[in-house]
Amino acid sequence: YVSRTLCVKPDPAELIELRLGRTAGFKGRLVIEGGGSYPREIRIRFDDLRALSGESLGRKTVQYTLPVGSNGQVGTRGRGMTAGGYDLAIVSGGLLERRISGLRLEAGRVTDLGDVVVQVGCEVALRIVDSDGRPVRDYTVVALCSSDRVWTYGYSDREGHVRLFGRFP
């Protein structure tokens, strides 16, 4: 059931009724494209607080951290979510972000996502300098990653260093 917080001033003359809604969940299996070991955990990110509270408090980003089983199994495992439609992002160190749009969760059911293919990424470190070899601060670097036309970007620090994470050709 979805948890609710209720603050009331006790009044013996009133009856307070609290209705709990049945929660929804999901499960699936990570498949790492090209093979590799599974991360110990992943983060799933939603852009609406309804995912946690059942009430829409505006478009805000919230996330859960979920364990990953030895065979790549992942799921909400008792973390109840409010039924509804969601767009979610799966994030983990070393893997490219994987988005799942239009995920529909029904009350009292666990939706099976099946195999969720994720890609391994890599980090590229750069140093931006001017024509005299001095570091350039706050320089924007944009790179096109792989053939699927995904862009990544970063900003140089005060020493001119930039780190980009993505899937580069």
Image (cartoon, helix red, strand yellow):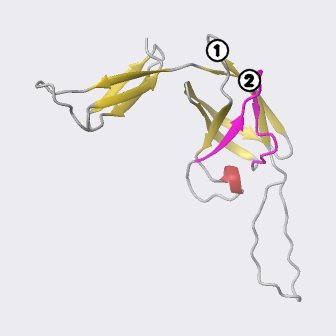
| Above-or-below relation of 50 to 129 | below
Q: Could you say where residue 99 lies in the image, as x and y percent from the top left?
A: 59, 31
- Work out which quarter of the rendered image holds the C terminus and state it: top left
Q: Secondary structure at mark 2?
A: loop
Left or right of 42 on screen, residue 131: left
Which residue is the site of mark 1? 36
In this view, the residue farthest toward the left is 132
Mark on residue 168? none
Left or right of 156 on screen, residue 151: right
Q: CA distance from mark 1 to mark 2?
A: 11 Å
Q: Which residues are magenta?
A: 62-81
Left or right of 96 on screen, residue 29: right
Contact between labelled residues 2 and 1, with CB atoms less than 8 Å apart: no
Residue 73 belongs to magenta span: yes
Q: Could you say where residue 63 lies in the image, as x and y percent from the top left?
A: 62, 45
User: Which amino acid type corresponds to the residue marked 1 in the rendered image?
Assistant: Gly
Q: Residues within 10 Å of mark 1 (few under 14, many from 20)?
A: few
Residue at 72% x, 46% y is: 84
- Work out which quarter of the rendered image holds the N terminus and state it: bottom right
Question: First in sequence: mark 1 or mark 2?
Answer: 1
Depth check, front residue: 142 or 22:
142
Q: Could you say where residue 159 lies in the image, as x and y percent from the top left?
A: 26, 34
User: Which amino acid type corresponds to the residue marked 2 in the rendered image?
Assistant: Gly
Q: Residues within 10 Å of mark 2 (few under 14, many from 20)?
A: some
Q: Could you say where residue 111 lies in the image, as x and y percent from the top left?
A: 80, 35
Which residue is the site of mark 2? 72
Q: Secondary structure at mark 1?
A: loop
Label total for image = 2
Depth check, front residue: 169 or 136:
136
| Above-or-below relation of 128 to 109 | above
The quarter of the picture where residue 109 lies is top right
